[in-house]
Amino acid sequence: MTPPTRLAGTLIPAMAFLSCLRPESWEPCVQVVPNTTYQCMDLNLYKIPDNIPASTKNLDLSFNPLRRLGSHSFSKFSELQVLDLSRCEIQMIEDNAYQGLEHLSTLILTGNPIHSFATEAFSGLSSLQVLVAVEINLPSLKALPIGYLKSLKELNVAHNLINEFHLPEYFSHLPNLELLDLSNNKIRRIDRKGLQVLHQMPPCKLSLDLSLNPLDFIQPETFENIHLHELTLRNTFNSTAVMKTCIQGLAGLTIKRLVLGEFKNERNMDSVDKCALEGLCHLTIEEFRIAHFDDFSEDALYSSSCLANVSKISLVSLNLKSLEGPPKDFRWQSLTLVDCRLEHFPTLDLAFLRKFVFTANKRVTTFTDVNLPNLEFLDLSRNGLSFKSCCSDRDFGTTRLKHLDLSFNDVITMGSNFLNLEQLEHLDFQHSNLKQASDFSVFLSLKNLVYLDISYTNTRVVFHAIFDGLFSLQVLKMAGNYFQDDFLPNIFTDLTNLTFLDLSKCQLKSVSQDAFGSLLKLRFLNMSHNNLLSLDILPYKDLSLQVLDYSFNHIVAAKRQDLQHFPRSVSSLNLTQNDLSCACEHLSFLQWVQDHRHLLVGAEKMVCAKPLDRQGMPVLSFRNATCQTSKTIISVSVLGVVVVSVVAVLVYKFYFHLMLLAGCKRYGKGESTYDAFVIYSSQDEDWVRNELVKNLEEGVPHFHLCLHYRDFIPGVAIAANIIQEGFHKSRKVIVVVSRHFIQSRWCLFEYEIAQTWQFLSSHAGIIFIVLQKVEKSLLRQQVELYRLLSRNTYLEWEDSVLGRHIFWRRLRKALLDGKPWSPEEITDAESSQQEATAST
């Protein structure tokens, strides 16, 4: 046990040395991708660490106090593509700070209190496409010297102090700019002069986000003859009147997508007056999107013809309650209704509508027939819809449907085989409760279907012709369903063009040898999370598989003859989380795993489940030599190891006992220096000093005790002192038994040595003093000590006048046994004894 002073003497210099090291010399950065991606976030760095390689492409230095970027700060990293300097307390960026970063495409400066940019601060960034300057206290776009970043596509200056929407002249030199995010600034008005530069930029390419600005006025004709790709105005107006005025100020704008509304958790307005949207009549809009209004009626959409010629309408999180359908002369081609709290399915009769998305409207449970003769795309997912008889052209009012999504709904009963819906290419039923899907060939007429998802539809496949007619199908997902007898038969006869098949979580136990016989174009097969017991290769021997997933099964091994037919086209095989056996009977399979580790996904995670002595062992660590070694050699080796281990353990365990034996031979005939060596817990030292030492060494007759705190020789090991100074030079041993004694490893060690000492020395004796009552349950933990105290007489300390007298009389008598005396000492001892007797 190392003394505390020595431990402190070692730690203090080490801590002083570490405190002198600067953080950048510790190699603190996390290497996410070797030599490519490094994360140095929040490490209190004052400069860029020197140990980051020049080949780094992605570097995250966020939340470090860099404070100032000097010239050529990153010139070492010529391959850098993404640089994150978020919240680095940067106040100044000098000229040519990024010089040499010719490949940098993304630069993030979020949350830095930048006071000024040098004129050439961003020079050298010839490939920069994304610049994020959010929350940098930017007062205006003029303060940002980026006119020479010709490759810039996205500029995000949200959450700054910009109070006027004025695009500097240098914007005309940014021909590739696609997004300007000015959201969450202080812009209150937009004037004609501030947007003059937009007339010089490519039409219908730039998207503007002015959300979360306190906008209250747009000067008329400001957007006249301006072409934008998208304009977003969310949480921008504080009243319907302001909204109406600003929309009128957009007159003359040609735009592909206009987004109005609020945010879910931030509201300025709860309602929209139907007059607020009248100004849209003076805009040319391709798509109109409005979101998050608690009070929004269909009158706002239909009150005027402003939206009649818009191609796409999106209504998101509006409290509509009902929608009776727009007038027939509206030329909408796409209508999206997401979470609009409708109570009934809308009645639609739109001749031009090609795409209808109706999702996340949980209150609607009944589907109403619609008349949409040109509809091609229909998404009814994530509602509470039920279909008593699905599906035919009568249900959807069209024969041109190509995309149908009925996923995440309620019960869908298959009553027809998609009559007059032969043009369907995409069909999704996942996580809906599909009924009667396996009663007849429900997909027989869908010869053009390319994608089919019936995953987790509670379908029990009994009818073998369930997929008949799907000659064009390329993707089939049917995870989480069931098969009769947990057996996969050949039900894919017509799926000759299938490339992707998901059969995971289908509780499969076995597979027919010809189950995949017709799937000659199959590339991806997922058989994971089933109950398969072996890797049966024969069903795949003629396929062109590239990815085969057999993870989370109960596979033990594969037969040797089967492995000879393993498809050479497979580049990825997953066998993780199986019950693989590393027994010699499967040697051919284990060798095959070793030889094909390059195509095994997570090969290092494949572990043995059997036999028990190899359970948890990595399969790749299995060696063929294990099975070729004779039993005799194994037995001899095991026996040799056991013998050596036993000898080593015995030597280690009885090292100090052997040391004591050697000492007995050396000191056995000499005189003892001490009358007794005292074994006690440091917790009981007060009693030893104040009672035992005081009464025995200062009394008459006096005895000389060996105590470790004063008699052990400094610089010698504790164990050596115990044996040489304690046992070898003492006539007897006093053992002070207490709760602390039983719980001390050192005390128990000394007690074990004392037993050996008593056995080796004929004149030795052990005197037990029980200092305090010790619970038997605690004492029984030390079996030998419990037996000795149960069978032998011991002294018990009692703190009373009579008890103390009897205790010291008995202890002195035990110590006098075998003690050599001089005549003077005998006379003193007798007189002392008589005085003690008289006093009692």
Image (spheres, rainbow, N blue to C red):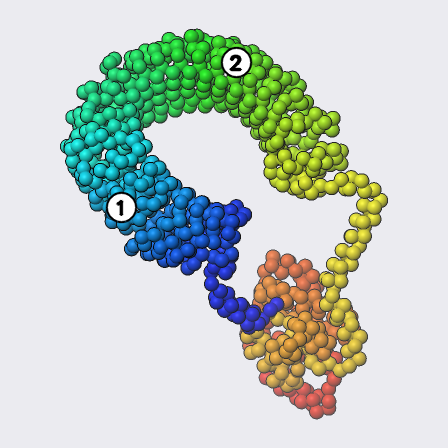
> Residue 518 versus residue 310: which sits nearer the camera?
310
> Residue 792 versus residue 415: which sits nearer the camera?
415
Q: Is residue 680 left or right of residue 294?
A: right
> Residue 372 versus residue 839: which sits nearer the camera?
372
Q: Can you see residue 687?
A: yes
The residue shown at (21%, 43%) is: 164
Which circle marks residue 470 in the picture?
2
Residue that numbered label 1 is attached to: 141
**Mark 2 Cα within 10 Å, few/some/many (few <14, many 20+)?**
many
Q: Is residue 690 left or right of residue 66?
A: right
In the rendered structure, which disc, 1 or 2, sits on the residue that comes first in sequence?
1
Rendered location of residue 713, percent (x, y): 65, 79
Given the image, on which type of amino acid does mark 2 rest? Leu
Q: Is residue 780 left or right of residue 278?
A: right
Q: Can you see residue 289?
A: no
Rendered location of residue 29, percent (x, y): 49, 53
Q: Is residue 118 above or below residue 436?
A: below
Between circles 1 and 2, the one closer to the viewer is: 1
Q: Quarter of the image containing the C terminus?
A: bottom right
Q: Are marks 1 and 2 in contact (CB under 8 Å)?
A: no
Quadrant for residue 758, please give it. Answer: bottom right
Rendered location of residue 601, percent (x, y): 60, 36
Secondary structure of the residue carrying tag 2 is loop
**Mark 1 Cα within 10 Å, few/some/many (few <14, many 20+)?**
some
Rendered location of residue 183, percent (x, y): 28, 40
Q: Quarter of the image containing the N terminus?
A: bottom right
> Residue 742 versus residue 316: which sits nearer the camera?
316
Secondary structure of the residue carrying tag 1 is helix
The residue shown at (68%, 27%) is: 566
Q: Is residue 547 above or below residue 735?
A: above
The answer for how far apart the CA atoms under marks 1 and 2 are is: 58 Å
